Amino acid sequence: MAKVIGVRFKNTSKVYFFDPLEFDCPIGVNVVVETSRGMEMGEVVVPKKEVSDDKIVSPLKEVIRIATPEDIKSVEENAKFEKDASVIAEEKIQDLGLDMKLVGCEYAFDRSKIIFYFTSGGRVDFRELVKILAQAFKMRIELRQIGVRDEAKMIGGLGSCGNEICCRRFLGDFEPVTIRMARDQGLSLNPTKISGLCGRLMCCLKYEQDNYEAVRKVMPKVGKAVITPDGEGVVVEQNIIGEKLKVNVNGEIREYPMDSVTRIAPKKDKFDKNINEDVVENSENDDVEDVFDDEDMG
């Protein structure tokens, strides 16, 4: 176990752990820490607590100091410089005719370098651009190509739900999202309805997927015969979230809680029984491989 605090930096929702040493680091205070990119200032979002060693990325870096008024002022000035730097970089990109879209830039805390973020449909030879920018700003230049999801996370915006997009607001890492999730949840497969601002499948499709999979395993499928409080019927619709079923009972569609509905095992006639007995007898003498259909096993 180790004592840590959680720190969040600008343009990211991910929380990183640092050793607070003897500093008092309540939520909301700014601290200066050493990261893989050099010194940075971040905001404490998780107070001092103990976590297991398997949740820590070694080596655990330490807090250098509580941010001073000068540190905060320096970060504010860097934000102003970043706007001017973006304008200059955009002009140089257009002059060179490079096939790349500038997303934003970031000054290092100590102003030792500038990082420019861009998107592009392919590889870009930006060596000449780096030379020009280095001459213009008189400091180290880094260009990093990012994906469209990272672009949306940096820029931000409102999703179709009316809230700020999740990746900007709280998501630390991007998780894989597939079209199967939309299909399992009964959503329209129209790309415009299930895609986010980035043009990729919405991250929120992942949130309820585990519940859909768990309920679907125990819920009777559409077309299956069941016994309801009103008699036998056939399932015509599933409500996974509400854990309810719509059943056709004697020509009338009624809705029931899943717990009040019982499956009816498929009936087997005598002919089928004899065939099954023959297969069992044969399997005693020969190697017989059982083949199951995924749909039946579901």
Image (cartoon, rainbow, N blue to C red):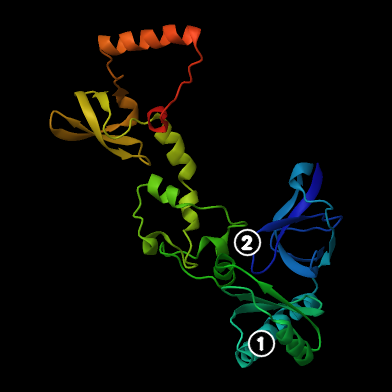
Residue 4 visible in the snapshot:
yes
Q: Nearer the viewer, residue 206 or 275?
A: 275
Image quadrant occupied by the C terminus: top left
Q: Secondary structure at mark 2?
A: loop
Vertical order, 75 against 20 (above or below)? below
How far from the left and from the top, in percent, is residue 193?
A: 37, 61
Where does residue 32 sit, x and y in percent of width and height?
A: 80, 67
Q: Amino acid at mark 2?
A: Ser
Q: Residue at x 25, y 12 (%)?
A: 269
Name the amino acid, label 1: Ala
Count of picture labels: 2
Q: Is residue 233 above or below residue 237?
A: above
Residue hosting label 2: 13
Residue at numbered disc 1:
89
Residue 262 to residue 166: above or below: above
| Closer to us: 247 or 8 | 247
Upstream in sequence: badge 1 or badge 2: 2
Disc 2 crowd, CA 10 A, few/some/many (<14, 14-19, 20+): some
- Count residues near mark 1 (Cα–Cα under 10 Å), then give few for <14, some for 14-19, many for 20+: many
Quarter occupied by the N terminus: top right
